[in-house]
Amino acid sequence: MSLATEDLSALEARTRALLASDALTTPTRAALQGRMDQRFEPTHLLSPDQRRTLEAACLRLIPEPDLVRRTALPAAFEAKLAKGLFRGWRYAEAPDDLTLYRAGLDALDVAARAATGTAFADLATEPQDKLLKVACKGEPPFDGSALDHWFEELLTALTELYYAHPLVQVSIGYDGMADAHGPQAVGFQAVSAEAGRLGR
Amino acid sequence: MAAEPPPRRYSDREPVDAVVIGAGGGGAPILMKLAQAGLSVVCLEAGRSWSPKDDFASDEMEQEKLFWKDERLSAGEDPIAFGRNNSGIGVGGSTLHWTAYAVRPQPDDLRLRAEFGVGRDWPMTYLELEPYLDEVERMLGVSGPSPYPWGPPRSAYPRPPLPLNGAAQIMQAGGAQLGLRTSPAPNAAPSSDYDYAGLHRPACTSRGFCQAGCSVGAKGSADVTFIPLALRAGAEVRERAFVTGFEREGDGRLSAVLYTDAEGREQRQRCGTVFLCAGGVESARLLLINDLANSSGQVGRNFMAHPALQIWAEVDAFVKPTRGIPGGLISEDTHRPEDVSFAGGYLVQSIGVMPMTYASQMARGYGLWGEALTSHMRRFNHVVGINICGECLPHPDNRLTLSDELDARGLPKPMIDFSNGDNEKALTAHGDRLMTAVLEAAGAYALKRTPRNAHTLGACRMGSDADDAVVNADCRSFEISNLYVCDNSVYPSALSVNPCVTQMALSLRTADRFLARR
Ligand SMILES: Cc1cc2nc3c(=O)[nH]c(=O)nc-3n(C[C@H](O)[C@H](O)[C@H](O)COP(=O)(O)OP(=O)(O)OC[C@H]3O[C@@H](n4cnc5c(N)ncnc54)[C@H](O)[C@@H]3O)c2cc1C
Ligand code: SF4
């Protein structure tokens, strides 16, 4: 079920009931319940302007406003940045993560002001998307090694944080975390039978 | 089960017979063999040990603790994504999160140069590896089809195949339409409870989290197979021991391994022989940092990563792509395809996927964002995928070097330059056409390609010529007689199969060769 047909409080109740059930192993429940209730301290890594740009960009990259707000996605990203993103690699041309993300957010805002006289965060969604499309392609003014793969990194980091959240997972119909009861209960046999109905 | 004896502790003042660096696919089998032969042996492993049942959650983000997170710099036309994709840390190494796809090479895989005039041959034959491959499959409790449809006859797999997930059934149906032979794949997870060498492992429950660690302890990772047997035979595994250097005698032989312990103290372990098994990137990095075993200039060169294009598609059926053993189905009909312009070949494999990994692929690999991303993710339960794993030719400029940037330990970060050559591109294009046809024949739609190279191979290659390789056929350094390197970095050619089973077999052979010399 998607959010179009279910409001946030119903999704929240359904998710909490699933996580509390014995269909989850103890370590799985601990990890997911912890994430449900996680609060993020503000950091000093981003300026207020950078933070506003980030929040606005989040809502366009992942346009599910209720869930983006409930999962505190921008704050979760900032907290991860504070810990170091630790993905284990980076493009050799790109600067370190913090420098890269700051430069990217600044560039987005500068481009918005240059084109429209308005901060990125205050633009309507359409011109925001237009700028993000340019950023996505790495076209000017989003080219150059200081912004190397900036958009890809931001998008990937946000996407991973978002789809790791149990509320979001349940909202897309994912229940893979509920596997404590072994092969009969993981929904696997039923799936096998149904996969016979192939294609359209 | 009988109570385990207390783990053995060696003093670091007394020299031990051997130190094994790294407790992954390369190191763990050697550790076991040497301990079973009665040698005093210590394994120094950068990561910690885990209890699958208590420590592993069915959650991708929680399980990121299994990935090697020290930063690597990726350059070239096709920069390699490390981290989640390409390396692990901990007692068990990358086998903690390997997908358990337990394929063997075919005999001609080891003779690429003899057959095609490119790349390199392995300095050994398939027949020499065969008994070790048998042993590895028994140790891992591989579930697979017997007889196996491709390659020479082989001993029966210990267990029959695991059930096929949605992607596997789609690939099977598409293959049948096109005349592409498919088969349930060999996977290192027993389809019923498995007892071997005094170890008990439960059956795979098809939960599909292999790449995030197997919490039920079914998957044949080193931590539930070779390592416990090594410990029983008296080996010591020193966890959170990060090796940084070596001490040498006047004659050039190594006399001790230097490492930083769990408390951050500098330590030294004296030893008779060193087995460097720190994986496809870290072994070459350690040799370069310490300027060891590199008068050939080959350390770091010829880095290879299998072309591993994935194609995702949607089906109407509700398939829950996470469920089931991920690599359910295989075809090796493309092992040596006819009428093609490239050397070598590839295998085709159906794949399962967890949601965060999939979303990440869609964002980074396919460029979906906005409504396109969120609406696609709402179709997650209808996603199927297949991929290839194909030959990658060695190229001297695909290379691991030390960058000027230092990491938190003050060691230079490794920089890996990688570009797919013409052979990899032609092979990938062939695989792309085939996988597209298979998916479309099965009625799948909305295909999405995510280009990828997988596995870290070759930067300390093995060979018979000291000017062209770093180690010989016994995985012993041409220069330092008591230094062995045995992990994915010694692969002279990539093989058109996933590397782990071959690695473990090579490690067992290396241990035997070493023991025979003593
Ligand atoms: C996500 C993923 C999926 C995979 N799936 C498959 C599959 O389905 N089938 C297949 O055949 N293969 C697969 N592989 C590959 C397989 O995991 C490798 O072939 C195998 O683990 C290689 O063994 P290794 O010893 O080279 O490296 P590793 O297993 O990575 O072991 C290296 C060890 O050395 C340790 N180490 C590194 N540096 C130091 C240091 N300085 N000091 C101390 N310790 C150190 C590391 O922590 C690590 O534990 C997969 C790999 C990954 C990453
Ligand atoms: S699918 Fe099987 S082997 Fe893989 S994690 Fe689940 S139980 Fe373990």
Image (spheres, rainbow, N blue to C red):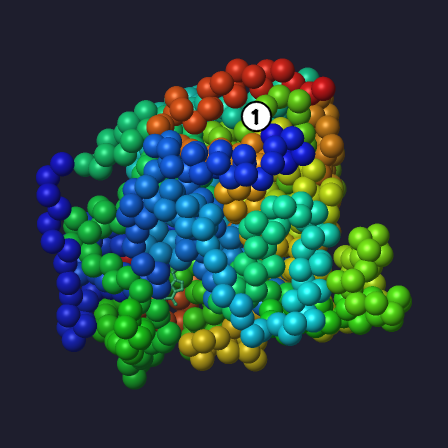
Asked whether the viewer can see residue B187, the reply is: no
| Residue A94 pos. (x, y %) | 66, 70
Asked whether the viewer can see residue A3, the reply is: yes
Question: In this rendering, is residue B11 above or below B208?
Answer: below
| Residue B115 pos. (x, y %) | 61, 43
Please name the residue that numbered disc 1 is placed on: B319
Q: Which residue is at 32% across, 41% downward? A: A26
A91 or A12: nearer the viewer? A12
Res B348 quadrant in image = top right
A56 or A198: nearer the viewer? A56
Question: In this rendering, is residue A36 above or below A120?
Answer: above
Question: In this rendering, is residue B506 above or below B144?
Answer: below
A117 or A27: nearer the viewer? A117
Q: Which residue is at 35% across, 70% downward? A: B243
Within 10 Å of disc 1 (Cα), the crowding (few <14, some 14-19, many 20+) is: many
Identify the amino acid type marked 1. Answer: Val
